[in-house]
Amino acid sequence: MNTAKRVLTPQEYRLEVEALVPPLPVVRLPLARCRGLVLAEDVVAGVSLPPFDNSAMDGYAVRASDVVGASAESPVRLPVADDIPAGRTDVRPLAPGTTQRIMTGAPLPEGADAIIQVELTDGGVDTVRIDASAVPRTHVRFTGEDVRAGDVVLRAGTVLHPPQLGLAAAVGVAELPVRRRPRVLVLSTGSELVAPGESLAPGQIYESNSVLLAAAVEEIGGEATVLRFVPDDVDEFRAVVTRHATEADVLVTSGGVSAGAYEVVKDALTGHGVEFVQVAMQPGGPQGRGVFAGLPVLTLPGNPVSAALSFELFVRPALLAAMGHSRTERPRSRARATAAMSSPPTRVQYRRGHHDAGHVEVVPVGGPGSHLLASFAASNCLIEIPAGVAAVAAGDEVDLVLLD
Ligand SMILES: Nc1nc2c(c(=O)[nH]1)N[C@H]1C(S)=C(S)[C@@H](COP(=O)(O)OP(=O)(O)OC[C@H]3O[C@@H](n4cnc5c(N)ncnc54)[C@H](O)[C@@H]3O)O[C@H]1N2
Ligand code: MOO
């Protein structure tokens, strides 16, 4: 049996996978649907922020020259000529020797140059006693202090988090041009798999990869569609994928790629645009990638931790790059391992670990096995042991990929 396959480093394979997934198209979406997406064009402010001079306090708009020397011992009394709630659009000029009651955010009347906050007055509505003086500009928020009309307020390539979306709304923009969410088909294979909630017969296990992978897609802002797992049947597999090919940007499968007699993914896609290779890492060694029925396909190994790590290391960066993110990799750190670990010297090994808040120490969680899903779920980082290293001693510094 000829099982010779290309062997790639994780880094080489990551670049191949990234090259397979083209940039997603730009669409205009309402702000409420843009969170986490990447802006495709600069946004220019059509209005200044603030758009008009306005009050920063509830109080009284005055000419500073009318309240010179005012204090609790020697207050100034002024007639209240008008009332200006926020939103008033017909504010009248402030006549010398008068005041206008004004609320936070209301336009400053022409002629006024300071605000006396209400706590420094008797709160009068016909006349008001003012117990403090103010220098010009006190509690006034000036036009364009934050943004000037015509400024670029958001650059293309910006990731749209809540503050950026708030700013777009503040300058009056209702929709933004963004790279749209990737639509990912998630397909698990394996005749032993039973959906959670159903009962298990001997030899069956609960299907977990599609839940994990779909959640991982959604966590980065993608849309996942989980296809009912097809039985280990090559023709049916190809038919299901072909039927859904136009609805998606990427197909991610798990299982059916190793050396067994019933490897449906490998059997269905070998010679149909997908190449199966060996990546020099553990877990996650057997991988496949290519284009089938016009759809980029990434075939992940079926062991739950292998599938999860393959998503982390290959699928996630490729999807983020297609979405326009410039930062596609997880942050990294280094810490001292609290226990010794062995590693296959010809491959990069990804152990699961739990690091402390300061990344001083990392505790290996569970062993190297790719079936240890509970250990993975109890981890907050991967411990990356490079190829060429067969043993790590307790106290050695190791590289971490931070997952939290
Ligand atoms: N003779 C060899 N056997 C194996 C090799 C090898 O090189 N030679 N590689 C091993 C490695 S490493 C991995 S990883 C797996 C990859 O196998 P497959 O991708 O073909 O996956 P399956 O055989 O279908 O499943 C492996 C394992 O994972 C469980 N599984 C699969 N899908 C799911 C799912 N959706 N949810 C939960 N669990 C799932 C499945 O029951 C198996 O236990 O091959 C090794 N073997
Ligand atoms: O590569 Mo497999 O993913 O070691 O378990």
Image (cartoon, grey):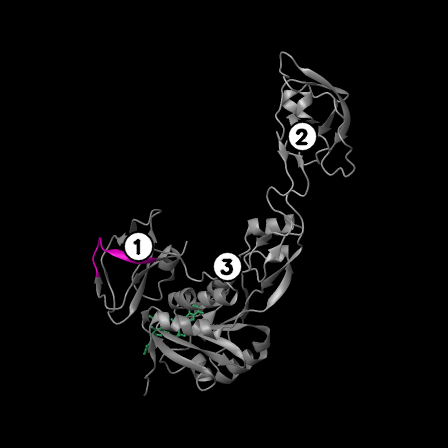
Quadrant assignment for the N terminus: bottom left
Q: Amino acid at mark 1?
A: Arg
Image-quadrant location for residue 143: top right
Please state the horizontal and vertical placement of residue 218, each as a whole percent of the image: 52, 61
* Residue 71 placement, left or right of 312: right
Determine the CA span between mark 1 and mark 2.
56 Å
Instruction: Identify the mark nearer the N-term, 1 or 2.
Output: 2
Please state the horizontal and vertical placement of residue 310, each as a whole percent of the image: 40, 68
Residue for point 55% across, 55% down: 160
Which mark is on residue 113? 2
Instruction: Identify the mark nearer the N-term, 3 or 1.
Output: 3
Give the extent of the magenta segment: 392-400
Q: Amino acid at mark 2?
A: Asp
Instruction: Identify the mark nearer the N-term, 3 or 2.
Output: 2
Which mark is on residue 219? 3
Residue for point 30% across, 54% down: 334
* Residue 113 placement, left or right of 23: right
Asked if residue 32 is positioned above or below residue 294 in the image, the reply reads above
